[in-house]
Structures are given as C-alpha cells and as structure tokens.
Image (cartoon, helix red, strand yellow):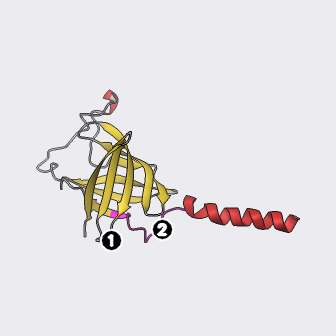
Amino acid sequence: MLRTTMAAIAAAVLLIAPASAAPSAGDPVLGRWLTQSRKAHVEIAPCGASVCGTIVWLADEKDGHILKDANNKDPAKRGARVLGSRMMWDFKPAAHGWTNGRIYNAEDGATYRSVLKPQGDGTLIVDGCVGPICRSQKWTRVP
C-alpha cells in the first residue's frame, strides 16, 4: 500500500514538474529581441520559474535624449526612465512558448495579458490581450 502511494506521488510530481520548471538556457524565447516597431530591444531572461523582459535599447534615446515613462497610469512612475525598465513578467511555461504573462506598453501606459510564441523561422510572436481581443507583434532576434 505504501509503495503504491509513493509511486502515485512520484508520478504526480513528474507530471507537474515540467510545468513549473525554470526556463532552460536553450529556451527559444530567451535572448535579445527587436520589437516590430524597430524602436526597442527587449532582453528576455529567466526570472525564477518564469521569464521576464527588460528594455535594453531604445532608438529614440540618443544625443542625450532620455525617454521617461510619461504615460504610466501611476503618476508616481511617470518620471521613471523607460530604458532599463522591466516590461514583461509572470509568464508560465506552455507546450509552445509562454502564456499568462503581463506586458507593459509605455506608449499608452497600460499593462496587458501576454503570450510568447517562438516561431520556426526564429522570430517571436508576442500577443497582448484585453479580454478576448489580442494584438500580435512579430519580434526578430538581435544577433
């Protein structure tokens, strides 16, 4: 009886473990990505059992011009610099990418549900959703 119970627990742990495992170094979403607008590079990296994304380059930040998070819904954050900010978090591993994450859009100051779907051609589809309505962007890997 004890062996059967232990075997059942071990099997359950093995079934659950892949869903909660941390991202591996070979995960196709990890790395630096150029957004569809070509205005930013986002570095996607492991964050515990999830992945998160940080803005590491902005096309409009040059010649001493610094972009601030002027449209943030939180007035206390409107003076924060966009470069270096975390703009993606809380993704959960899925069969073909990462789901149930959040993505912040500094252009409108809103946060959306998000899904990351690596494609066979080496691009990344990034969905941002409000309710059942989603908009997709195709990001390209930065060499």
Q: Amino acid at mark 1?
A: Gly
Task: Give percent across and percent down for residue 142.
Answer: 25, 66
- Residue beneath the point at 27% across and 44% down: 82
Residue at x 77%, y 68% (from the top left corner): 7
Q: In the image, is residue 22 part of the stretch drawn in magenta?
A: yes
Please say if the residues under marks 1 and 2 sit with CB atoms less than 8 Å apart: no
| Residue found farthest to the front | 132
Q: Which residue is mark 1?
A: 120
Which residue is drawn at the image coordinates 31% and 58% (left, top)? Answer: 125
Residue 5: mark: none
Q: Is disc 2 surrounded by few (<14), some (14 to 19) or many (20+) residues within 10 Å? A: few
Q: Secondary structure at mark 1?
A: loop
Instruction: Give the dominant element type of the magenta stretch: helix, strand or loop.
Output: loop
Residue found at the far top of this picture: 75
User: Of circles 1 and 2, which is in front?
Assistant: 1
The magenta-colored residue range is 21-31
Please provide percent x and percent y for residue 97.
Answer: 42, 61
Residue placed under numbered mark 2 in the picture:
24
